[in-house]
């Protein structure tokens, strides 16, 4: 195919890319590895602290238990060691107690009391001042030891000062040995051994050094555990980062994919899950690439001819404008419109028309250079961008294309068709104009070629008048858009009378634009409306306003009917039938009170689509009139294909019909043909009484014109029994 492809579009819309990128890692947002590490660190720290806490609690419990056990052991031993103090030389016994106590640095002091609670002697003080801080046993404590304890009981856990410092005390008892009773043994006699309270022993215990040592060791172990936990957490982070690194490596490919770039390689991870993700991503990329190719083909190329589509052509033309500006090498834009293509469709069918379009596309491709770009712009219209050519080259190329098209030998069902076209050319020298404006220039030149006789080419001449006209068109475009948005259009009504009764049967609805106090005729703005694509919107505005006005007329007691003009563009919009039905129902208007007018050329050009829409509207009860009949190139054969109710004879046959016999003969034939196909005839542009009388003589049914009544915003109700001379001012 001639020409180059346009730049590859993105695979996703901007909104889809933004939604996708919102899910991508952004600056300041934690990564998966960081989150995993934080969770792991918090968990391990909690476990470590729990372990250290448990160890600390256990160590404190061990300290308390050991102190209790040792205190019991020591107080029991000192009980037995201290008993001789109450019966023998105390000094010798004191040395035995002292020797025993020195074996245990935790014993701070030892005190012995007699049975009355008097201190016998503080036998041992282990280098500290705990004995000075701890008072002697009180009378209450001695009383408790005298009354509430047996020989195996003791009092413990009376703390002094800070730290692990306690006092343990117990009673000292002596048992007397009774007679063996061998000679006078009595089983029921009293066998108990009498006990004698000797006194009390008190121990001051200082476990601070032992507790501090054990606590220090516990803290060291706790620190070691926490360090191990932290090291495990760090190691876990590196392990997790290494395990998840294939996921991190997907960030760049996914970012490029979201931007429309699918040309990259994926690193294969060793884990099953990563391989599954990569496999799914590769499958997704493959599917997106295939979809991208299909969408690009559908968007940028015409499926029938294989040529570039309008969208792709406009994109490529925009890109070329920048190169033309920088390289200072002009190009030519050609707009080609086939002449009488509708005749092929109507005569041989749409399938034949499609085959002809394919032949035309092949001819255009073969007539161009590789560097040129050819496009099917729409319907039977084609555009060509000829790069690096002068105006002389463009003139030669246009003539070569006309000759090549004329040489096409297209035969369908034994019937040969001549393929002719009109070509408009504009020279592209800079980027002062947009692609749309350049296409409009070439289109205007093409219309000029058609107006000058068809099968020819014309150049768009950028002279001052044309520039002024282009500026005027742009001004009309803005004014039309404003009129639609702000309701600056208005309607006028011209009566169509029954020639026999001179009474109005219809009122043709005529569109006008309001500009302050001025009323602008449609000939000033409708050409721009066609070029800038406003016609469907204008058609809908006319339908809506006309039906609302008709409802008001009928509510005022006027059983009138309106004739509305439709442009050909509306037949490309399937909404028109539902739109008419909706507004008929909304205004409670019978469909029989509405007549739609379409021109002969529009009806023939859109014959297939027009027949379908006309049929649906007629089923609703609407009527149709064929306007400007006789002004085009059609034959009477089309009247059999179009389901019309009225035939409006073009004004060129009516203006001087009272004295032109040829026009009289033409009108007489039209009346006879219309009568044969059950149509009523309407004569336009009736200018005087003589014309009206001649029309009545020729059998025309209805008439309208300035001689009868001018268009007005109010209804001229008639009957028009005394029509006056026309005012030609």
Image (tube, grey):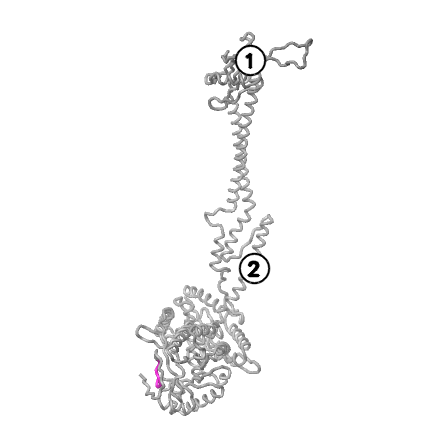
Q: Which secondary structure, mark 1?
A: strand
Q: Position of residue 37 (x, y in %)?
A: 52, 42
132, above or below 233, in the image: above
Q: Position of residue 210 (x, y in %)?
A: 52, 23
Q: Residues within 10 Å of mark 1 (few under 14, many from 20)?
A: some
Q: Residues within 10 Å of mark 2 (few under 14, many from 20)?
A: few
Q: Which residue, as the protein is rendered here, is positioned at the far right?
A: 183
Measured Cα–Cα span from mark 2 to mark 1: 103 Å
Indicate which disc residue 345 carries.
Answer: none
Check if residue 343 falls in the magenta segment: no
| Residue position marked by numbered label 2 in the rendering | 287
Q: Position of residue 402 (x, y in %)?
A: 48, 78
Q: Which secondary structure, mark 2?
A: helix
Check if residue 710 falls in the magenta segment: yes
Q: Nearer the viewer, residue 190 or 325?
A: 190
As drawn, is 52 to the left or to the right of 457? Answer: right
Q: What segment carries the magenta color?
A: 706-711
| Residue position marked by numbered label 1 in the rendering | 197
Magenta: main secondary structure equals loop
724, above or below 128, in the image: below
Where, by quadrant of the figure, is residue 648 drawn?
bottom left
Q: Which residue, as the protein is rendered here, is positioned at the far front?
A: 188
Q: Is residue 425 in view?
A: no
256, above or below 48, in the image: below
Q: Position of residue 333 (x, y in %)?
A: 44, 71
Q: How many labels were placed on the picture?
A: 2
Where, by quadrant of the figure, is residue 390 drawn?
bottom left
* Among the two numbered marks 2 and 1 on one chain, the one whose residue lies closer to the N terminus: 1
**Residue at (54, 82) in percent of width and height:** 416
In the picture, the quarter occupied by the C terminus is bottom left
**In this rendering, the label closer to the viewer, 2 or 1:** 1
């Amino acid at each position: 195919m001639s020409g180059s492809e346009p730049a590859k579009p993105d695979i996703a819309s901007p909104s889809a890319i933004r939604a996708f990128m919102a899910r991508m890692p952004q600056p300041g947002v934690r990564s998966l590895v960081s989150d995993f590490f934080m969770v792991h660190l918090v968990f391990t720290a909690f476990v470590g602290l729990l372990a250290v806490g448990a160890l600390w609690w256990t160590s404190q419990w061990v300290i308390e238990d050991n102190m209790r056990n040792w205190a019991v052991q020591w107080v029991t031993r000192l009980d037995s060691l201290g008993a001789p103090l109450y019966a023998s030389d105390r000094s010798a016994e004191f040395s035995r107690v002292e020797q025993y106590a020195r074996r245990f640095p935790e014993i701070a002091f030892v005190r012995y009391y007699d049975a009355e609670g008097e201190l016998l002697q503080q036998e041992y003080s282990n280098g500290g001042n705990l004995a000075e801080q701890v008072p002697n046993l009180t009378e209450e404590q001695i009383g408790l030891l005298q009354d509430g304890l047996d020989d195996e009981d003791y009092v413990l856990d009376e703390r002094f000062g800070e730290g692990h410092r306690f006092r343990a005390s117990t009673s000292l008892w002596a048992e007397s040995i009774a007679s063996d009773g061998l000679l006078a043994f009595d089983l029921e006699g009293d066998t108990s051994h009498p006990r004698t309270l000797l006194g009390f022993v008190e121990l001051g215990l200082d476990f601070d050094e032992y507790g501090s040592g054990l606590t220090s060791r516990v803290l060291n172990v706790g620190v070691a555990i926490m360090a191990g936990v932290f090291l495990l957490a760090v190691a876990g982070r590196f392990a997790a980062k290494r395990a998840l690194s294939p996921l991190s490596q997907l960030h760049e490919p996914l970012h490029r994919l979201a931007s429309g770039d699918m040309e990259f390689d994926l690193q294969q991870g060793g884990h099953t899950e990563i391989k599954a993700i990569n496999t799914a991503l590769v499958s997704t990329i493959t599917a997106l690439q295939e979809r991208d190719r299909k969408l690009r083909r559908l968007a940028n190329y015409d499926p029938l001819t294989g040529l570039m589509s309008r969208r792709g052509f406009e994109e490529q033309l925009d890109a070329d404008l920048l190169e033309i500006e920088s390289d200072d090498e002009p190009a030519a834009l050609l707009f080609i419109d086939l002449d009488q293509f509708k005749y092929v469709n109507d005569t041989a069918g749409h399938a034949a028309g499609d085959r002809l379009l394919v032949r035309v596309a092949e001819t255009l491709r073969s007539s161009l250079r590789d560097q040129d770009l050819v496009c099917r712009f729409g319907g039977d219209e084609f555009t060509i961008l000829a790069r690096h050519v002068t105006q002389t080259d463009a003139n030669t190329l246009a003539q070569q294309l006309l000759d090549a098209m004329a040489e096409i030998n297209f035969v369908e069902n034994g019937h040969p068709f001549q393929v002719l076209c009109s070509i408009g050319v504009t020279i592209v020298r800079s980027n002062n104009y947009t692609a749309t404006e350049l296409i409009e220039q070439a289109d205007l030149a093409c219309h000029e070629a058609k107006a000058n006789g068809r099968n020819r080419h014309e150049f768009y001449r950028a002279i001052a008048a044309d520039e002024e006209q282009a500026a005027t068109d742009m001004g009309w475009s803005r004014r039309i858009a404003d009129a639609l948005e702000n309701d600056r259009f208005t309607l006028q009504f011209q009566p169509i009378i029954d020639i026999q009764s001179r009474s109005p049967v219809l009122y043709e609805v005529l569109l006008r634009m309001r500009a302050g106090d001025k009323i602008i005729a449609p000939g000033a703005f409708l050409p721009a409306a066609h070029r800038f694509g406003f016609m469907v919107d204008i058609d809908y505005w006319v339908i809506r306003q006309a039906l609302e006005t008709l409802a008001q007329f009928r509510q005022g007691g006027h059983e009138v009917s309106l004739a509305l003009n439709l442009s050909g563009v509306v037949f490309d919009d399937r909404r028109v039938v539902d739109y008419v039905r909706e507004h008929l129902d909304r205004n409670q208007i019978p469909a029989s009170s509405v007549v739609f007018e379409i021109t002969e050329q529009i009806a023939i050009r859109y014959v297939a689509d027009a027949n379908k829409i006309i049929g649906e509207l007629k089923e609703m009860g609407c009527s149709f009139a064929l306007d400007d009949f006789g002004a085009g190139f059609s034959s009477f054969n089309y009247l059999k294909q179009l389901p019309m109710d009225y035939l409006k004879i073009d004004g060129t046959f009516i203006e001087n019909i009272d004295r032109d016999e040829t026009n009289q003969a033409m009108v007489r034939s039209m009346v006879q043909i219309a009568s044969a196909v059950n149509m009523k005839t309407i004569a336009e542009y009736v200018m005087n009484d003589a014309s009206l009388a001649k029309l009545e003589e020729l059998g025309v049914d209805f008439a309208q014109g300035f001689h009868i009544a001018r268009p007005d915003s109010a209804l001229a109700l008639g009957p028009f029994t005394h029509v006056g001379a026309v005012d030609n001012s």
